[in-house]
Image (cartoon, rainbow, N blue to C red):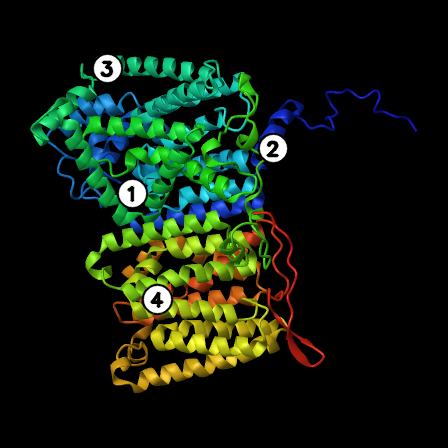
């Protein structure tokens, strides 16, 4: 046989390495970069991104006053004249929701003012967003302006996850992406037809090139220069990046006593490019847009004189006070999570004062605030949206230092690589060990840690949950949430002391239960979810009976199979019956828990574990029927129950469909924490369909939705909020399982479990593993 491979033309025979061997290094680098986060992590972020965008779309307008300028310029880049572009913009946006109250949007001669004067000087040189959106406007009409913000926000979240994963580990990256997606305000501006999402993406991409957790190379400088220029031609506030880098270089030079540190090339390059770009943009504004150029100082003098009857530095305190007052009340009304992130970021910046992230956050925030003062008008937090990723990184860095065994003292923290650029390697406590995965922090499921020290620390170590620093952070978060919720409606929440006591007990209860089932991280996540869910917190501190029912429902869940574990069966059944009876007596809406337990019993029967769940289902059925009969018998409760609306309505199906768009359901979708737990619960019912808890939580959620739709009461939102404990526990279980932690296969006995020895019950102390916290 003749071997033709030796004589074949190499051009006719494709190489075994592929048709494009030159692309293999690029493909390998790209795959290595994105594989830092597991596919499960990317799937979670994708689901969170879609849920946040849908929530924003359902609850907020997508166009505001500045959107009309970018749409007009997009039409201009498509070849329309100024008059035609302005008329097309007015035809689409005049009277549009979000611009109905705008009294200055359509002045006389707006066809000229859109492209000249102050508007031309601001929007004209920042060509990138309308230029990128022009093709989509040509394809999809004016709504094509929303394509670039959505894609930019998605890219920004993904890049932030990569940066956090580089610094601390893959699941810290997932946590960073989720923390940007959960607050409504950043994602709200990320979906608007504005430049905020694009500026956020360029900011995070530029941070990837900085010396944060790695040594930089020349190509990092090249990429940073390109991204900075793109940001400068997107938004005028991109100069804050340069301010943050300059401050970081200066403070690192003082800290390390080395002027030529790794931040010096970025400081010099960003300063040169920023000055050159601003000069070029000023010249373009002066020569191409009717000789008009924008001077922020002149505008500041004019507006402060008209508004505050003073100008110059004397007006700065009044402008700053008015801006902080308006922005604080706006953020407090719409976004509880961003207030928590702001406070914790401030604590991190002060405590971790040696950190490059803290210094950069101070520089960018201070320069953004200074530019906002020059603009005079309230910002409504919009100008700070590109700084939110840096706030998230600072918060995660503080949590890593305080809760991780590998983290260092916050006051000695740094993101510099030891020995990079001539910087000395930190010694002693300041040395940072390699980052550990988020899922490995704290004790495992059912494994209390032993620590040395005071007796109260030893007792606390036996309590399932996060370490002491984690409890402290959760307590601070709880106090902050309570303050914000009471400040929102002081007349409603001011005197519900017993309700506050009940909610205060519910938070550590769910933390301990979740930690018992899934470990310290699971407990921390469950406590954070319960604390940060605005509908649950508001209902809990507004009504004593609701807070009592919430605490009793957590007790019910603890007594179920797979709950606390290690208790005798008779004790679990008795505790379940008492807790469920208390929940039904306090709130008849707790009947949704009965439905959930019955569905869990059906799932257990299909999986061959029906005998274990059957007694709980029988108790739940008896108590549920008794509660319904009591509600029908008591006159004062009869009108509250939805049966009268449902059975006495002749056109009940049409009314059900008409009630699907109730404002209460919209309020639930506006709360990202609640919405995230709902989505994760439904995903758990599919991915973990052999687990009774998944079906129990999904059944509770469906029962709550049905009763919300069928109810004719004004407080029917309680049906859904009472389902939150089971939703949070199942959602946390899914997250822990996806992170790679081994779920508990059986209920291990507790530290003082009763065991049967020789026909008697004796107290047996179980030995626990020694875990370092």
Looking at the image, residue 471 lies above or below residue 371: below
Residue at which label 1 appears: 62
Residue 378 image point, x, y percent: 20, 36
Residue at which label 2 appears: 32
Observer-nearest of 394 and 505: 505
The crowd level at tag 4 (other Cα within 10 Å; few <14, some 14-19, many 20+) is many
Is residue 234 among the parts visible in the rendering?
A: no
Question: Circle 3 — which element?
Answer: helix
Is residue 5 among the parts visible in the rendering?
A: yes
Q: Residue at x 21, y 56 (%)?
A: 490
User: Tag on residue 547?
Assistant: 4
Comparing labels 2 and 4, the label whose residue is closer to the camera: 4
- Marks 3 and 2, Cα distance to the nearest angstrom? 46 Å
Are dots 3 and 2 in contact, CB under 8 Å? no
Q: Earlier in the sequence, mark 1 or mark 2?
A: 2
Residue at which label 3 appears: 288
- Marks 2 and 4, Cα distance to the nearest angstrom? 49 Å
Q: Earlier in the sequence, mark 3 or mark 2?
A: 2
Q: Residue at x 34, y 52 (%)?
A: 479
- Marks 1 and 4, Cα distance to the nearest angstrom? 36 Å
Residue 13 position by quadrant: top right
Are dots 3 and 1 in contact, CB under 8 Å? no
């Amino acid at each position: 046989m003749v071997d033709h491979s030796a004589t074949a033309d190499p051009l006719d025979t494709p190489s075994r390495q592929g048709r494009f061997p030159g692309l293999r290094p690029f493909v390998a680098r790209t795959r290595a970069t994105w594989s830092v986060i597991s596919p499960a992590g990317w799937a979670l972020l994708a689901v969170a991104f879609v849920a946040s965008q849908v929530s924003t779309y359902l609850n907020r307008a997508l166009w505001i006053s500045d959107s009309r300028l970018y749409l007009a310029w997009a039409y201009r880049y498509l070849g329309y004249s100024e008059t035609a572009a302005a008329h097309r913009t007015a035809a689409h946006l005049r009277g549009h929701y979000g611009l109905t109250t705008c009294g200055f949007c359509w002045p006389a001669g707006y066809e000229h003012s859109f492209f000249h004067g102050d508007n031309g000087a601001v929007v004209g040189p920042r060509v990138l967003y309308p230029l990128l959106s022009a093709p989509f406007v040509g394809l999809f009409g004016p709504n094509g302006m929303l394509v670039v913000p959505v894609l930019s926000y998605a890219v920004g979240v993904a890049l932030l996850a990569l940066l956090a994963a580089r610094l601390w580990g893959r699941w810290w990256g997932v946590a960073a992406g989720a923390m940007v997606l959960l607050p409504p305000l950043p994602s709200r501006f990320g979906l608007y037809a504005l430049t905020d999402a694009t500026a956020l993406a360029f900011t995070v991409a530029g941070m990837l090139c900085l010396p944060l957790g790695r040594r930089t190379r020349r190509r990092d400088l090249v990429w940073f220069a390109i991204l900075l220029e793109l940001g400068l031609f997107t938004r005028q506030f991109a100069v804050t990046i340069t301010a943050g880098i300059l401050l970081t270089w200066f403070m690192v030079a003082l800290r390390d006593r080395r002027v030529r540190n790794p931040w010096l090339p970025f400081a010099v390059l960003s300063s040169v490019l920023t000055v050159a770009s601003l000069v070029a943009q000023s010249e373009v504004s002066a020569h191409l847009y009717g000789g008009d150029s924008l001077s922020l100082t002149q505008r500041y003098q004019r507006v402060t004189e008209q508004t505050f009857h003073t100008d110059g530095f004397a007006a700065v305190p009044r402008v700053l006070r008015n801006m902080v007052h308006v922005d604080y009340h706006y953020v407090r009304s719409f976004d509880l999570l961003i207030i928590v992130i702001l406070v914790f970021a401030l604590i991190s910046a002060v405590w971790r004062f040696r950190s490059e992230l803290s210094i950069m956050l101070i520089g960018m925030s201070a320069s953004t605030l200074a530019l906002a003062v020059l603009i005079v008008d309230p910002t409504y937090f919009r100008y700070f949206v590109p700084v939110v990723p840096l706030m998230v990184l600072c918060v995660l860095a503080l949590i890593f230092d305080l809760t991780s065994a590998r983290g260092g003292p916050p006051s000695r923290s740094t993101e510099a690589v030891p020995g990079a650029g001539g910087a000395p390697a930190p010694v002693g406590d300041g040395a940072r060990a390699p980052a550990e995965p988020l899922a490995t922090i704290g004790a495992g499921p059912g494994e209390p840690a032993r620590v040395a020290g005071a007796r109260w620390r030893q007792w606390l170590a036996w309590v399932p949950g996060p370490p002491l620093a984690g409890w402290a952070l959760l307590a601070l978060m709880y106090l902050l949430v309570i303050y914000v919720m009471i400040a929102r409606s002081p007349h409603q929440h001011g005197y519900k002391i017993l309700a506050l006591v009940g909610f205060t007990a519910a938070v550590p209860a769910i933390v301990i239960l979740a930690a018992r089932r899934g470990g310290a991280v699971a407990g921390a996540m469950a406590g954070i979810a319960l604390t940060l869910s605005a509908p649950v917190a508001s209902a809990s501190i507004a009504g004593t009976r609701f807070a009592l029912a919430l605490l009793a429902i957590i007790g019910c869940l603890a007594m179920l199979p797979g709950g606390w574990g290690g208790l005798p069966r008779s004790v679990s059944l008795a505790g379940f019956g008492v807790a469920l009876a208390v929940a039904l007596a306090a709130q008849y809406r707790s009947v949704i828990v009965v439905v959930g337990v019955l569905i869990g019993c059906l799932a257990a029967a299909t999986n061959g574990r029906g005998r274990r769940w059957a007694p709980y289902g029988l108790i739940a059925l008896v108590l549920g029927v008794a509660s319904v009969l009591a509600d029908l018998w008591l006159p004062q409760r009869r009108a509250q129950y939805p049966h009268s609306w449902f059975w006495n309505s002749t056109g009940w199906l049409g009314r059900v469909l008409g009630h699907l768009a109730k404002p209460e359901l919209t309020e639930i979708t506006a709360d990202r924490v609640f919405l995230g737990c709902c989505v994760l619960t439904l995903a758990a019912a599919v991915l973990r369909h052999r687990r009774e808890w998944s079906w129990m939580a999904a059944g509770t959620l469906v029962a709550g939705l049905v009763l919300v739709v069928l109810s004719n009461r004004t407080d029917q939102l309680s049906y859904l909020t009472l389902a939150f404990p089971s939703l949070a526990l199942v959602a946390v279980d899914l997250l822990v399982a996806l992170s790679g932690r081994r779920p508990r296969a059986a209920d291990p006995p507790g530290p003082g479990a009763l065991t049967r020895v020789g026909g008697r019950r004796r107290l047996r102390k179980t030995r626990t593993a020694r875990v370092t916290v």
